Structure formats: C-alpha cells, structure tokens
Amino acid sequence: MYDINFDKNAKDFLKKLKRGDQEFILKRIELLKENPHLGKRLAGNLFGLWKLRIDKFRVLYRIFENKLLIVIIDIGHRKNIYE
C-alpha cells in the first residue's frame, strides 16, 4: 500500500472547495493507495506525472515506486489544471 502526500497547491485548492466536493475528491484519491496506476500517464512537458479524472476536476500526481509514495502535485478544474 502506498502513502499519499499533498503539495501546498493541492491543499490550497481543496480548502477552497465545498465540503462535499472535498470529500468526493479525497475518497477517489484514497483509491490510489491500492492502485496508483488508476489514473493516466501524462506525456510532453508533464512527462513523469499522472492524472486522475474526478468529474470536472483533475488530480496531478507523481508515483515514487521505490518509496511506495504518491505525491499529489496539484488539483484543479479540468479547464485550467494544465496551464
């Protein structure tokens, strides 16, 4: 099982959301503990990152296989998360 850490950007975005949206996103992120490859691998300038689609939101994360660690880099709306 993997541990999950959140970068500041991800924490800040979650704090701005309604409680229901926060809980919904966090429940989906918890699934990564058992299956970190649940998302899709990104390419190009985001090579090395993965994305998890959660309704209108996207979670960008990095997997550290050797440490059994997932770092949530950023969370945002699908329209502007990749900017």
Image (cartoon, rainbow, N blue to C red):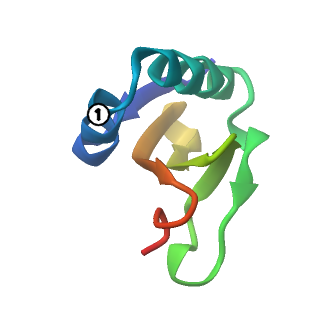
* Image: 54 above or below 79: above
Instruction: Check disc 1: other Cα within 10 Å, few if <14, some if 14-19, many if 20+.
Output: few
10 left or right of 4 in image: left
In the displayed structure image, the side of residue 14 where residue 21 appears, left or right: right
Image quarter of residue 48? bottom right
Quadrant assignment, res 35: top right
Q: Residue at x 50, y 37 (%)?
A: 70
Q: Position of residue 36 (x, y in %)?
A: 68, 36
- Residue 72 spot, x, y in % from top left: 44, 41
State the SS at label 1.
Answer: helix
- For the C terminus, the quadrant is bottom left
Q: Residue at x 46, y 27 (%)?
A: 4
Count of numbered labels shown in the rendering? 1
Q: Is residue 32 above or below residue 78?
A: above
- In this view, which residue lies farthest toward the bottom? 44
* Residue tagged 1: 16
The residue located at (45%, 51%) in the rendering is 76
Residue at 71% x, 21% y: name it: 34
Image vertical order of residue 61 relative to residue 68, above or below: below
Which residue type carries mark 1? Lys
Residue 61, percent from left and from top: 51, 48
Query: Which residue occupies the foreground of this view, 40 or 23?
Result: 23
Instruction: Report the side of 73 relative to 47 (left or right).
Output: left
